[in-house]
């Protein structure tokens, strides 16, 4: 064989090795796991380098804007009626919250915090209110009691009004982390914060992502992992709200964490869990909570009239579990 041919073959082999090595680096899927907002997060993404710092910084910013457990956060200072500098993350969440409150006739309401606390599901110690206390607290609950100025400032009609964005903040955090990853050039990713999820592209098996919906069994320790259904999705967000994890019993009666802003009492509807799939997780998170407040019949009618929302409701009919699934979500279902 001519020397020139040998050199040419060696060059091709070297070039192939370089290409394969580069492709291997590009195909690395990384996983970040930890605790944030009182829950577990899992982030899986394909990247040539770890993006741990970027992910944690995004979560830190959201914690500073929206955490009720952080005394220095924007929302804590607003609740104490202190002067607050413009916070774009806080303003964005409040704006979207008010839009969804209007759309759901107040079934979603970030001013419900005093009632949530009174029933023992907030950031204060558990209590049990009487009817007079509930009626009194209802006077300072209602999304119409807050406005967002063009400058992004929250104005309260009553200084006793208290905000709680916990029913939308996790979804917003999911979106924010996903956006951070995409800004770093990540095309394949899954962000999961406490069961609220956003996915894009393909999973490590180079397939669409598969996201499970848990069976709504009483599970205050979050140890149950039995699935009711699994959806297959390549881009979009999913959030689930349910009364099967955050609850307590008093005098033989179960009290769950979803409070109806209109009545001031925990909901007693037949819906056990509401899953929403849509474009962004902030929206999915808020509407999932709204459907738990609405109840089955109203929630079914609502989701049928909102084509951008796909839903999976699990509800009780006597001792039997039943499901309602929109047509769009039914097409995403695969075998668990």
Image: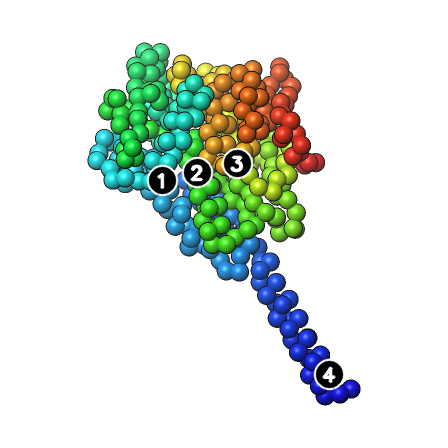
**Spatial separation of the CA atoms under disc 2 and disc 1:** 9 Å
Indicate the secondary structure of the residue bearing disc 4: helix
- Crowd class of label 2 (few under 14; some 14 to 19; many from 20; radius 10 Å): many
State which tag comes first along the sequence, 3 or 4.
4
The picture quadrant where one finds residue 103 is top left
Question: Are the two marked residues, 2 and 1, in contact with CB atoms closer than 8 angstroms?
Answer: yes
Q: Are marks 2 and 3 in contact (CB under 8 Å)?
A: no
Q: Earlier in the sequence, mark 2 or mark 3?
A: 2
Q: CA distance from mark 3 to mark 1?
A: 19 Å
Residue under pointer 2: 172
Indicate which disc, 2 or 4, sits on the residue closer to the N terminus. 4
Residue at the far bottom in the pictured view: 3
Q: CA distance from mark 2 to mark 4?
A: 59 Å
Mark 4 / mark 1, whichever is N-terminal: 4
Q: Residue at x 56, y 45 (%)?
A: 200
Please tell me the numbered disc located at residue 288: none
Residue 123 versus residue 336: which sits nearer the camera?
336
Residue at label 3? 279
Local secondary structure at mark 1: helix
The x and y percentages for residue 287 are 49, 27
Q: Tag 1 or tag 2, which sits nearer the N-term?
A: 1
Q: Quadrant of residue 101?
A: top left
Q: Nearer the viewer, residue 80 or 243?
A: 80
Q: Which residue is mark 4?
A: 5
């Amino acid at each position: 064989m001519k020397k020139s041919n040998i050199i040419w073959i060696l060059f091709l082999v070297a070039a192939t090795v370089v290409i394969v090595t580069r492709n291997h680096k590009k195909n690395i899927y990384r996983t970040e796991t930890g605790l944030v907002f009182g829950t577990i997060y899992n982030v899986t993404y394909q990247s040539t380098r770890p993006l741990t710092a970027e992910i944690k910084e995004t979560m830190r910013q959201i914690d500073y804007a929206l955490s009720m457990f952080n005394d220095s956060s924007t929302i804590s200072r607003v609740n104490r009626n202190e002067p607050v500098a413009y916070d774009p993350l806080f303003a964005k969440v409040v704006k979207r919250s008010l839009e969804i409150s209007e759309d759901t006739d107040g079934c979603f309401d970030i001013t419900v915090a005093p009632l949530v606390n009174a029933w023992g599901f907030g950031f204060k110690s558990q209590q049990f209110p009487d009817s007079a206390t509930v009626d009194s607290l209802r006077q300072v609950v209602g999304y119409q009691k807050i406005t967002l100025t063009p400058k992004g400032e929250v104005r309260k009609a009553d200084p006793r009004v208290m905000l709680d964005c916990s029913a939308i903040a996790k979804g917003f955090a999911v979106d924010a982390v996903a956006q951070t990853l995409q800004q770093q050039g990540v095309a394949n990713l899954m962000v999961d914060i406490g069961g609220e999820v956003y996915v894009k592209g393909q999973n490590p098996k180079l397939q669409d992502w598969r996201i499970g919906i848990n069976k709504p069994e009483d599970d205050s320790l979050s140890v149950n992992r039995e699935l009711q259904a699994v959806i297959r999705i390549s881009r979009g967000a999913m959030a689930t709200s349910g009364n099967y994890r955050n609850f307590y019993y008093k005098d033989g009666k179960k009290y769950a964490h979803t409070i109806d802003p209109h009545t001031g009492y925990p909901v007693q509807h037949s819906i056990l869990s509401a899953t929403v799939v849509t474009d962004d997780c902030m929206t999915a998170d808020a509407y999932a909570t709204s459907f738990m407040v609405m109840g089955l019949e109203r929630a079914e009618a609502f989701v049928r009239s909102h084509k951008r929302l796909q839903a999976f409701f699990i509800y009780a009919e006597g001792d039997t579990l039943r499901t309602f699934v929109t047509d769009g979500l039914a097409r995403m279902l695969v075998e668990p």
